[in-house]
Image: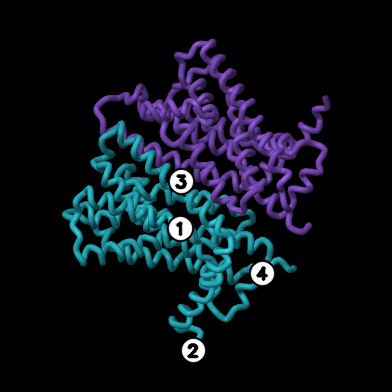
Amino acid sequence: MNLRKYFTLIKAGILDFLQFRLGTFVIIVGNMIYLIVIYNLWKAIYASVDTPTVNGMTFEETMIYLVLASSMFSFMECFLVWEMGRSIQDGNITLALLKPMGYAKYQYFSLAGNLVASFFLTFIPTFIVIEIITNGAIRPGINLLFFLFSVILGTTINFAVDFFVGTICIYTESIWGINIMKEVIVMFLSGATVPLAFFPKTLRSIVDFLPFQAIYHTPLTILTDSTLTIPAMLSMLGMQCIWVVVTLLIGNLFWHFSIRAITVNGG
Amino acid sequence: MKTLSLPYYAHIYKMILIQDIKSKMSYRADFFISTIGMIFTNLSSLAAFYITFLNFPSVMGWSYHEMLFLYGFSLLALTPLQCLFDNNWSLRNFVYRGDFIKYCFRPINTYFYFISEVFDLKGLGQGAFGLVTLIYAWNKLQLPVTFLIIVQLLLALTTASLFMIAIMNFAAATCFYIINSGYVMVTANKFRDYAKYPITIFEPFFRFIFTFIIPIAFIAYYPSLLFLRTNNIPLLTWLSPLIGVVFFYLSYLFWMHGARNYTGTGS
């Protein structure tokens, strides 16, 4: 198997990301303001109850969870739905289809470079800042290794969901509407807006049967919950693997079914 | 001069608007999907509120229904931005591709002509959602309804809407000065989500920032005090209409300065 083509795509993605340094700076400032807002909000929320823990989460744990979730969200954000939707509308999709590589695979490895770069530029700094501020609340150890695997699996599930939603754009011109629905559903059901621990029981049990919690919640739990044993972490990774297979399979089936229906104007 | 009169502009606005709505109506499916997407966004914010308040009784002395009031108010105050000023999102594409030059050759105000070109229908869905939320909260809080209060509410909403419009004007106009400024818009756009929180949750320093630098506190918090804290209304609440007009005018000047120095792309 020739791996060079994959590395070339990843490298191009990294260079593409670094091209827009000003954009990165603005994103960092935006994220900092976001963090200030949610920090103050949750501090105020916790200040209004007498107990230090609510649903087994202290203020500090809630903050770490939300901060890391938001930074994971921004590093995983790859605008794939927009990219696919636009190229379906302007016809550039035909060029991508002619490439000697499956479309999903091509997109996945093109995005991988971007993801690697933004992982180091947004997630790692956030993580380090949290470690410094909280005096090492997250104990580094074997969980970091599991976390890394879990992030890769989570990113893949996120990609598969995006790819599935992007495929819907073959049937409609409404990229904005489709994308915002996806974003809201993923954010909410993955626990990035409100930690899953706060969800009422019935809602929680429904969420556990959906793939979205495997995107952010699983890696974050592995990273932050120091009581997890290695077998427990392995079984969580196993669940993620199942979700990777299921979501990629569904995404690919849907794509291959839909691509026959594609209509490109002119060109 | 005829071209400067207000009725003349109103007439032109109506003509352009009708054309835009006609063309939008040929994509009915897009309208429905976008509206559903908009409602999804708001439903998820509402669900996040609800889940948070299942676990916590209040935030800094603000009850669940008072927070809902702020939320509904902010949604309504953001509706004019969403409906009438949405073309700012395309500004950077027009500037980048050189098509912006067409706006400079019209014998009417450039900003006016550019902004009037698009009416975003999906904003109406958000407005309706905000109205229902506000009425529900109003009812639960048993606030009085008199003619004077309704007039105050309408005035407060109108002037509050100017703040976010101005912020987006500033953000959009950055594309006249820097290339690939899409991130500025995306970052600035996130500020609208923070408008729904009472400013008292922040430390004095950030209260100052969110009042005078990024004035999102005027979108919902300060005007809402007029109805929620009737016996303790700060001066800023009374001044907010004036500040809104000034801030909007400044953003207009910044926008126009960029437009006047626009040199085109040479193509």
Amino acid type of the residue that numbered disc 1 sits on in the rendered structure: Gly
Name the kind of residue labelled 3 in the image. Answer: Phe
Mark 2 neighbour class, 10 Å CA radius: few under 14, some 14 to 19, many 20 or more: few
* Image quadrant occupied by the C terminus of chain B: bottom right
Q: For the residues carrying marks 4 and 2, which lies nearer the camera in this image?
A: 2
Task: Identify the element where label 1 is drawn.
Answer: helix
Residue B123 image label: 1
- Looking at marks 3 and 1 on the same chain, the residue that comes earlier in the sequence is marked by 3
In the image, what residue type sits under mark 2?
Met
Disc marking residue B40: 3
Disc 2 to disc 3, C-alpha distance: 48 Å
Can you tell which chain is drawn cyan?
Answer: B
Q: Are marks 4 and 3 in contact (CB under 8 Å)?
A: no
Mark 3 Cα shell of 10 Å, populated few (<14), some (14-19), many (≥20): many
Q: Colour of chain A?
A: purple
The crowding category of the residue bearing disc 4, from other C-alpha atoms within 10 Å (few below 14, some 14 to 19, many at least 20), is few
Q: Earlier in the sequence, mark 4 or mark 2?
A: 2
Q: Earlier in the sequence, mark 1 or mark 2?
A: 2
Q: Separation of disc 3 and disc 1 at Cα?
A: 13 Å
Q: Residue at x 59, y 44 (%)?
A: A24
- The answer to whether mark 1 and mark 4 are in CB contact below 8 A is no
Is residue A210 depicted above or below A144 in this figure? Answer: below
Q: Earlier in the sequence, mark 2 or mark 3?
A: 2
Residue B167 in sight: no
